Amino acid sequence: MKMEVIRMNKNELEKLHRIIDSYIAPRTSSSLSKLLNEPVEHRLTKVTDVEISKMEDIIKTVPQEEMYAVYLKGEGDVHLGMLIFLKENDAMKLASRLLGVKTMNKLDALGRSSISEVGNILMAGSFLNALSDGTGFQVTGSVPGFAIESARAVLQYPASDIASTTDIIVTADAVLHATQSDITVRILIMLGENEAKKLIDSDKRVSK
Amino acid sequence: MNQIHVAIGAVVVSVDQETELNTFVGSCVALCLYDPYAKIGGMSHIMLPKNGIGKSNHNESGKYADQAIEITIKMMIEKGADAKRIKASIAGGAKIFSTESGESIFNVGEKNTASIKEILREKRIPLISSHVGMTYGRWVKLDINTGKMTVSNNKHAEELVCEL
């Protein structure tokens, strides 16, 4: 049986853009700002929906070098995947800042743990709390998974996770930039189109 | 040599002797099926073990292991392959993400691999080789003329896995 592919319309994508932006701007970026003790700029670059077979279009927008990535699943009233990416240099700077060491040449177990914890704080803590406050949904973050791999390899797991219920993946791509240390953290929120529509509908209820 | 890229969740079958099929797999698994006599080969990029909801978009016919194997064999037979001669090789199924406590919540790669092996056994298709597991992604190539399957990535040079 062929599944009917229902794409989101422009209006829905714009609405989702505003909703996710409203979770990231006040909460996620301010969490990173507190962790680093410096101003953090936030930019939600794009909200888009893509057929799974065209997932590699997303990969083209991510640097092709090896990335340091943390992935968390959000489970409960809405299901979503949350991925943060850092380039190697930024991961070292972030870990050394958090661990209070001057420089770091290689990410040891403690360094990896600190990056995972940043993912946990930014996504399971700040983002999901903002989502719950905004929609009333109860969503719990999984334990964070850590990887050092190409974006191509890293994206397959969240894609598979979401692909079990849909053929369309909605992605929200945001960038947080710490202005003094020049650390850039890229965030990719991924969810199925039905889950995205749940967020949009719940936002209508909240804003009534 | 013509290169045909097999997209995530897709299936491609070719009879063109000048063609090489390729795909990149992390936790997903590349399944290569080949009839050495007819020189017909197929590659599917499998994302999930089984189709739990019983429906799929035709563009993502390789998404689920059960459907991917079925469809690849059907496409190969339509092009002149004999099901009794078809051999298989798989690569991928890596565990890209790890947790500090070693929890197994990110092990879809392992499940994909187990599911494919089980279905191949049921269909009596010999699995010649499997380059699976580990923690890294791989490029997988299948040469339609020779049936050679190779894997590589940015840390590991191209390696011949098998000749189907």
Image (cartoon, coloured by chain):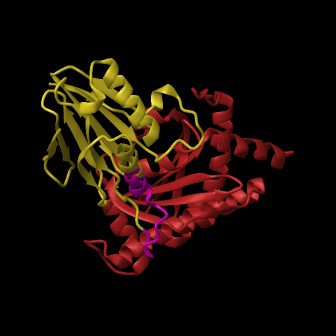
Chain colours: A red, B yellow
**Residue B44 painted magenta:** no
Placement of B131 over or under B144, stated as above or below: below
Toward the right, the furthest residue is: A208
Residue at 31% over, 58% down: B133
Q: Nearer the viewer, residue A188 or A169?
A: A169
Q: Nearer the viewer, residue A68 or A81?
A: A81
Placement of A35 over or under B44, stated as above or below: below
Expressed as whole percent of the image width and height from the top left, the position of residue A31 reads: 57, 66
Expressed as whole percent of the image width and height from the top left, the position of residue A65 reads: 28, 50
All told, the count of numbered labels is 0
Please tell me in which quadrant of the rendered image residue B143 appears: top left
Q: Nearer the viewer, residue A92 or B145?
A: B145
Q: Is residue B103 left or right of residue B126?
A: right
Does the rendering let one see residue B22? no
Toward the bottom, the furthest residue is: A100
Placement of B103 over or under B81, stated as above or below: below
Expressed as whole percent of the image width and height from the top left, the position of residue B153 reads: 21, 49
Q: Is residue A135 left or right of residue A174?
A: right
The magenta-colored residue range is B99-114
Placement of B37 over or under A162, stated as above or below: above
Residue at 83% over, 46% down: A205
Residue at 49% over, 26% down: B58
**Residue B104 painted magenta:** yes
Q: Quadrant of the N terminus of chain A?
A: top right
Residue at 28% over, 38% down: B32
Does the rendering let one see residue A81? yes
Q: Nearer the viewer, residue A87 or B29?
A: B29
Expressed as whole percent of the image width and height from the top left, the position of residue B114 reads: 39, 54
